[in-house]
Amino acid sequence: MDLNYIIAILAAGVVAGTPILYASLGEVIAERSGILNLGVEGMMLVGAVSAFYVGTYSDNKWLGLLVALIAGGLMALIHAVITIVFRASQVASGLALTIFGTGLSAYLGRGLVGIPPTSTFKAVAVPLFSQIPVIGDIFFKQDIMVYLSVILVVILWFVFYKTKIGLLLRAAGENPSAVDALGHNIFFVRYVAVIVGGMLAGAGGAYLSLAYSPSWIENMSAGRGWIAVALVIFAVWDPARALLGAWLFGIIASLGLHLQALGVMIPSNFLQMLPYVFTFVVLVFTTRETKNRRSGTPAALGIPYSREER
């Protein structure tokens, strides 16, 4: 395997990891506020079908992305109302939204299967940087949504650890009663976090249908929403580590596809399992670390908040 082939695998891995990165970042935001959202898979699918439909019939990929953001945000709003207002089980609500999103996307996309997209995100080389040997080919010859995802990681890291907004968000997931006692509206904080998280999940779905595999196929997220939720634990609720985890998943997925292309005598089904097996193994080792309380797990994650109980 020569250097060019390795570069191709790594570059493809960045692309394959991008939809997971968007969804993971959204889940990091939601969970940092104390709300567990297991509806990411459904939100990605609704985002994917919405983006493809609008992007194709309007011939405007940016409009398709905008609609995907709105669709993901609206689904997240449902989750927020159920879990924050009615204090229902966050696990049950998230699972219900995944089932709902899967069925809704299949229904909305019935007439879209096989239709070629008219507007998609294509690779754009960054001047000067794309000429850097190896690094330029891997990171600076990608589409704009890849670049935006990296910028988003930097912005979120800065907001989380260098601003009062980030401190308030993290405090909401650690000690909501203290945040409430200081006069901040804990419910508003969680609403915003959950909705923004859903919007990013919708953006991950839009990337699938407008960039990664420009088309609409039923269940095209193929479990990436669940991988995004799992990678949040690997990332210890940190945006930078979410980037690392998403790209590692993408590289493993890309490796399996390239091995098939090389004619490696390994069953294709086994190669397709590689990224999920990798995620499982990483999750096991990461979970062992959480027992040392170094993981940064939000203390109030998954626990409904009531002012009467503070």
Image (spheres, helix red, strand yellow):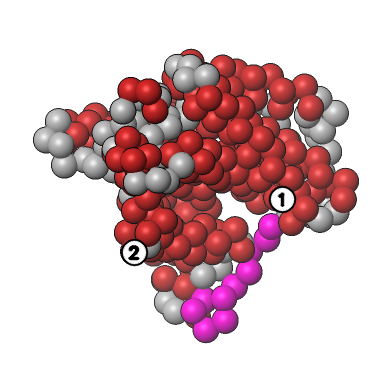
At 61% from the left and 27% from the top, the residue drawn is 78
- Residue 203 picture location, percent across and down: 61, 46
Residue for badge 2 = 162
In reply to whether residue 129 is colored magenta, the answer given is: yes
Label pair 2/1, CB-CB below 8 angstroms: no
Residue identified by numbered label 1? 66
In the image, residue 115 sits, relative to residue 89, either above or below, namely: below
Q: Main secondary structure of the magenta part?
A: loop
Residue at the limit of the structure toward the right, as seen here: 57
Q: Going 34% across and 31% down the picture, which residue do you hit?
A: 301
The image position of residue 273, as x and y in percent, is: 42, 29
Is 51 colored magenta in this rendering?
no
Q: What residue range appears in magenta?
A: 121-130
Q: Position of residue 289 (x, y in %)?
A: 16, 36
Q: Nearer the viewer, residue 186 or 160?
A: 186
- Amino acid type, label 1: Leu
Viewport quadrant of the C terminus: top left
- Answer left or right for 197 relative to 245: right
Q: CA distance from mark 2 to mark 1?
A: 28 Å
- Bin the neighbour count of mark 1 within 10 Å (Cα to Cα): few under 14, some 14-19, many 20 and up: some
